[in-house]
Image (cartoon, rainbow, N blue to C red):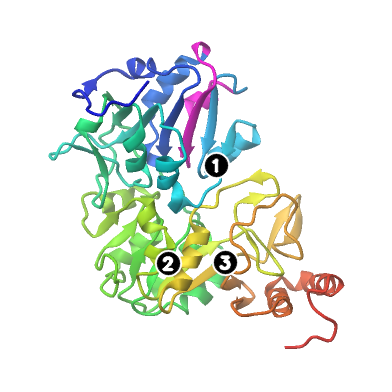
């Protein structure tokens, strides 16, 4: 199949008819999170026995996918993900989902320069609007880049998809080949568990570092969300938002009048994001609200964009850090659990911003097989992926304190990070650091 320069008028067809275009060996793209198709997915799964080696790119699946559930041994469909959700992680553990390494902000360029044209792009969208566009809803990311090169574009329209304002937020009907009717099921939510005492202890330290007029990027997870909760209790005002993921905590700050964006240099007055996943309350807040500005991910995530705002504050999680400051935020050994996302890009962009700071937060310990283990270690676990290199790491925060690693030598880093570890692990970490010459004997600072 070759992509046409000029498309014929889009045709309304059934999901089964749309699935009939798929041939063995094709590359499909399902998009991510709220944009993943449902009725097309079911129809394609019904064609399982007639297909082989159909490869599907995706991101953060928020519900079970029929092509995986009906093909448990992977004889027909191959699932590849730019970032894992809990469901994708489960399928990875079953040998049914593979990760695609990236910096999230570079993905539009991958599609334009390095990835062969996608055979069929299928996205769930809003119904056709008054200007002739199918709005993507609150997931913008790299869709425009795929549409430029896809050989066929199919939209699955849903009345329940929030219609969002922003830049490059939809596909014009003239760019679409086929339209299918979705099931109008509610947009999937991402549960936000209440913060733990440790989450709040870490968040309290970070919230104290946020000043009036700072521009926030908040990552996914309990600790970053806890920062938003504590900022509600603080006096910080006139905050800006330029983020990858929009979370409920940022929307609550906006509702409370703490986010105005009045001091931003880039898109003043706008809450800029590339995708949003959260509660139905969030989706309602986004719907046709011009204060929220969805943009392609190469606009939100590339460091030279991020740094154009002053006083950027980037707040993200990690799962393990070694005594030199390397951050492993996406895997547990060879078991992949999430993805690189935009962590490294926001760490760099925040640092390059005038007065900017990046914060990496983690609990000092976790439990595995019923035993407490330290997240601060001499060496990263075998197979663990370095998400952010030691040279980029700035502030590190646990429930035991905070340290800025910029400008610190290896011995200084090791000693500072040991003090952030749980007291039960500090003596062993110090012994290991001495044995491996990270800390020279007698070194004091």
In the displayed structure, 321 sits above or below 169; it is below
Residue beneath label 1, please? 100
In the displayed structure, 293 sits above or below 20; it is below
Image coordinates of residue 129 in percent, x first then y, are 17, 38
- Of badges 2 and 1, nearer the viewer stands 1
Image coordinates of residue 384 in percent, x first then y, are 69, 52
**Secondary element type, mark 1:** loop
Mark 2 surroundings: few (<14), some (14-19) or many (≥20) residues within 10 A:
many
Q: Which mark is residue 409?
A: none
**Secondary element type, mark 3:** strand
Residue beneath label 3, please? 361
Mark 3 surroundings: few (<14), some (14-19) or many (≥20) residues within 10 A:
many
Q: Which mark is residue 228?
A: 2
Image coordinates of residue 130 in percent, x first then y, are 12, 39
Q: Residue at x 61, y 63 (%)?
A: 389
Q: Residue at x 52, y 43 (%)?
A: 85
Q: What is the spatial separation of the Cα atoms under label 2 and label 1, in whole angstroms? A: 31 Å
Magenta-colored span: 49-72
Check the picture and name the quadrant holding the N terminus. top left
Q: What is the spatial separation of the Cα atoms under label 2 and label 3, in whole angstroms? A: 14 Å
In the picture, measured across the screen, residue 48 lies left or right of residue 289, that is: right
- Of badges 2 and 3, nearer the viewer stands 3
Q: Is residue 188 in view from this perspective?
A: no
Q: What is the spatial separation of the Cα atoms under label 1 and label 3, in whole angstroms? A: 25 Å
């Amino acid at each position: 199949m070759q992509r046409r320069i000029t498309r014929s008028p889009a045709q309304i067809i059934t999901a089964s008819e749309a699935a009939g275009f798929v041939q063995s060996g094709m590359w499909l793209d399902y998009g991510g999170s709220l944009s993943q198709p449902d009725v097309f997915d079911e129809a394609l799964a019904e064609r399982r026995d007639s297909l082989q080696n159909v490869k599907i790119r995706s991101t953060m699946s928020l519900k079970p996918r029929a092509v995986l559930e009906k093909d448990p041994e992977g004889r027909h469909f191959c699932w590849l993900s730019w970032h894992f959700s809990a469901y994708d992680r489960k399928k990875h553990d079953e040998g049914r989902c593979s990760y695609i390494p990236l910096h999230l902000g570079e993905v539009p360029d991958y599609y334009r320069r390095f990835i062969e044209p996608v055979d069929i792009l299928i996205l769930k969208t809003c119904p056709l609007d008054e200007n002739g566009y199918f709005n993507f809803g609150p997931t913008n990311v790299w869709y425009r880049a795929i549409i430029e090169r896809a050989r066929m574009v199919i939209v699955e329209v849903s009345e329940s998809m929030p219609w969002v304002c922003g830049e490059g937020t939809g596909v014009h009907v003239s760019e679409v080949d086929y339209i299918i009717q979705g099931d109008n099921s509610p947009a999937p939510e991402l549960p936000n568990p209440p913060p733990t005492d440790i989450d709040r202890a870490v968040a309290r330290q970070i919230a104290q570092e946020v000043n009036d007029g700072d521009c926030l990027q908040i990552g996914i997870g309990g600790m970053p969300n806890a920062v938003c909760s504590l900022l509600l209790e603080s006096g910080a005002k006139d905050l800006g938002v330029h983020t990858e993921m929009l979370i409920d905590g940022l929307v609550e700050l906006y509702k409370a009048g703490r986010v105005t964006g009045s001091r931003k240099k880039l898109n003043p007055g706008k809450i800029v994001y590339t995708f949003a996943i959260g509660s139905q309350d969030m989706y309602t807040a986004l719907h046709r609200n011009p204060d929220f500005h969805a943009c392609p991910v190469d606009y939100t995530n590339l460091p030279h964009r991020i740094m154009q705002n002053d006083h950027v504050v980037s707040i993200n999680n990690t799962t393990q850090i070694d005594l030199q400051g390397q951050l492993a935020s996406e895997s547990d050994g060879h078991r992949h659990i999430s993805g690189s996302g935009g962590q490294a890009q926001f760490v760099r962009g925040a640092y390059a911003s005038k007065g900017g700071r990046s914060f990496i937060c983690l609990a000092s310990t976790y439990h595995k097989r019923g035993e407490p283990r330290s997240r601060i270690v001499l060496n990263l676990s075998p197979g663990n992926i370095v998400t952010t290199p030691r040279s980029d790491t700035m502030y590190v925060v646990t429930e035991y304190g905070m340290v800025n690693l910029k400008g610190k030598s290896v011995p200084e880093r090791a000693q500072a990070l040991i003090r952030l570890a749980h007291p039960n692990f500090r003596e062993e970490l110090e012994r290991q650091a001495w044995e491996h010459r990270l800390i020279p004997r007698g070194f004091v600072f």
